[in-house]
Image (cartoon, grey):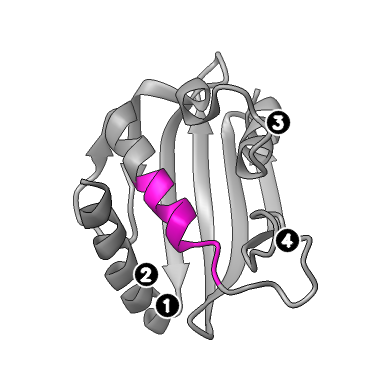
């Protein structure tokens, strides 16, 4: 099931998945942020965090274009591990000239809906930068 879910996630990232996050996320989805201590529970708050991340994480313009995160974005996935209902997607980007490396850990239910989305980021410089930018983006969206 995770293979289909991740294919749909990649299509969503390219703006090519009908229904977007509403179709991908389970109602009781839990989001684990690298910058917020407590798990964020529910589809709506998970959507808010993922939308804010999509506006923050495209990063700097890609030097050669064609990145997975969309036209002109430096965001791209570099590794993918799928097993059972779980996926680990490693990504890289550059924000404000700073290198960002992280993983999206995704779990789906038997219907292919995402029930857990966990983001981990490194190095510390990137965590601090993402914290500032995500905070500003979430405040702007509120």
Q: Position of residue 86 (x, y in %)?
A: 57, 36
Mark 3 or 1 closer to N-term? Answer: 3
Q: Position of residue 138 (x, y in %)?
A: 26, 53
CA–CA distance in space, label 3 to label 1: 29 Å
Give the residue number, with chain letter if any, for mark 1: 126
Q: Position of residue 57 (x, y in %)?
A: 49, 62
Q: How many marks?
A: 4
Give the residue number, with chain letter if any, for mark 3: 3
CA–CA distance in space, label 4 to label 3: 21 Å
CA–CA distance in space, label 2 to label 3: 29 Å
Residue drawn where x is 61% and y is 59% of the image: 90
Labelled pair 2, 4 in contact (Cβ < 8 Å): no
Labelled pair 4, 3 in contact (Cβ < 8 Å): no
Question: Which of the 4 image quarters holds residue 76?
Answer: bottom right
Residue drawn where x is 28% and y is 36% of the image: 45
Horizontally, is 122 left or right of 93 in the view?
Answer: left
Q: Magenta segment range?
A: 49-59
Image depth: mark 4 or mark 3 in front: 4
Image depth: mark 3 or mark 1 in front: 1
Image depth: mark 2 or mark 3 in front: 2
Labelled pair 1, 2 in contact (Cβ < 8 Å): yes
Front-lying residue, 76 or 124: 76
Mark 4 or 1 closer to N-term? Answer: 4
For disc 2, the neighbor class at 10 Å (few under 14, some 14 to 19, many from 20) is many
Q: Which mark is residue 130?
A: 2
């Amino acid at each position: 099931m995770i293979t289909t879910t991740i294919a749909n996630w990649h299509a969503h990232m390219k703006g090519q998945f009908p229904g977007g996050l509403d179709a991908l996320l389970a109602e009781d989805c839990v989001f684990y942020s690298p910058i917020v201590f407590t798990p964020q529970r529910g589809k709506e708050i998970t959507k808010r965090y993922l939308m804010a991340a999509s506006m923050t994480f495209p990063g700097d313009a890609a030097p050669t274009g064609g990145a997975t995160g969309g036209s002109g974005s430096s965001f791209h996935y570099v590794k993918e591990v799928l097993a059972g209902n779980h996926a680990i997607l490693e990504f890289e980007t550059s924000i404000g000239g700073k290198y960002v490396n992280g993983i999206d850990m995704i779990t789906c239910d038997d219907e292919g809906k995402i029930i857990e989305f966990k983001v981990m980021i490194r190095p510390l410089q990137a965590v601090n930068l993402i914290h500032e930018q995500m905070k500003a983006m979430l405040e702007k969206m509120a």
